[in-house]
Image (cartoon, rainbow, N blue to C red):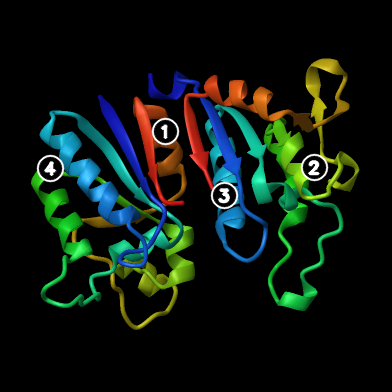
Amino acid sequence: MQEETIKKFMYMNRKAPYGTIYALEALEVVLIGAAFDQDVSLAFLDDGVFQLVEGQDTDGIGVKNFSPAFRALGDYDVTKLFVEKESLEERGLSPDDLMELVWEDEDDDWAEKPSIRIVTRDELKSILGDQDVILSF
Amino acid sequence: MKFGVVVNEGPYTHQASDSAYQFTKAALAKGHEITRVFFYHDGVNNGTRLTVPPQDDRNIQKNWTELGKEHDLDLVVCIAAAQRRGILDENEAKRQGKDADNIAEGFRISGLGQLIEAGIMSDRLVTFGD
């Protein structure tokens, strides 16, 4: 019975990718959680939007660049990445600064579709209101 | 109601573990069920038996161990987070070739799947941390 329960899981990413471990360990939860066949979404807001910036280079700080792992999310059926528009703008970023993340839609002849969806703060509010489980990192 | 509890910060530096403990205790006193307490990020440091806080201060690890014993709580330390931070049980210490373990009584080390499962089987998953 337990296995049949499908809940809406939201992983909120609010911190920069480096400087603290929260972003990396959040991604580890997402990757493990993908095996549970739940309805998964990710949100990126506040400094969390920096996690998706294209061209991250961590050589200078001696920390592993884990951003390529975001590209694997589509293969794990994690296809809904909501990025808050206001958080981008407040940090001088635009959607063009982000990695191009895609997933393949098996119901549409495996067409590649974008995983990142830019949403406003108000839209994100209602998306969060729909969730069953919110894990904030 | 069934509550799952997540503790994301270590003891003493941050109030998260204290608040989670008080919450868990209060929820149990009100007759609620605690499905699991999951320790993640620096929260895994709540599960070492080697902490020696001053005698006039609370012992956070002991508080958890005692509450766990009293109510048969499932206190789970994330294995991936624990390995990074040097929290080991006997099996893990052996497996990793370390000369000691430090997991406290009443805690067990397991995978992140236990966190997801807590989310699935609880009516509410309550996170303590920033």
Q: Residue furthest left?
A: B70
Front tag of 1 and 2: 2
Query: Helix or strand or loop: what does disc 4 sit on?
Result: helix
Percent x, y of residue A54: 85, 52
Give the residue type that dot 3 points to.
Ala
Q: Which residue is mark 3?
A: A26
- Disc 3 crowd, CA 10 A, few/some/many (<14, 14-19, 20+): some
The amino acid at mark 4 is His
* Circle 3: element type: helix
Disc 4: which residue: B71
Neighbor class of circle 1 (other Cα within 10 Å; few <14, some 14-19, many 20+) is many
Q: Nearer the viewer, residue A68 or A61?
A: A61
Q: Are marks 4 and 2 in contact (CB under 8 Å)?
A: no
Chain at tag 1: B
Under mark 2, the amino acid is Glu
Q: Secondary structure at mark 2?
A: helix
Q: CA distance from mark 1 to mark 4?
A: 20 Å
Chain of the residue displaying label 2: A
Residue B2 drawn at (x, y percent):
27, 28
Distance in Å between CA atoms under marks 3 and 4: 30 Å
Chain under numbered label 4:
B
Give the label on residue B119, or none.
1
Q: Nearer the viewer, residue B44 or A19?
A: A19
Q: Decide: is A71 above or below B97.
A: above
Q: Are marks 1 and 2 in contact (CB under 8 Å)?
A: no
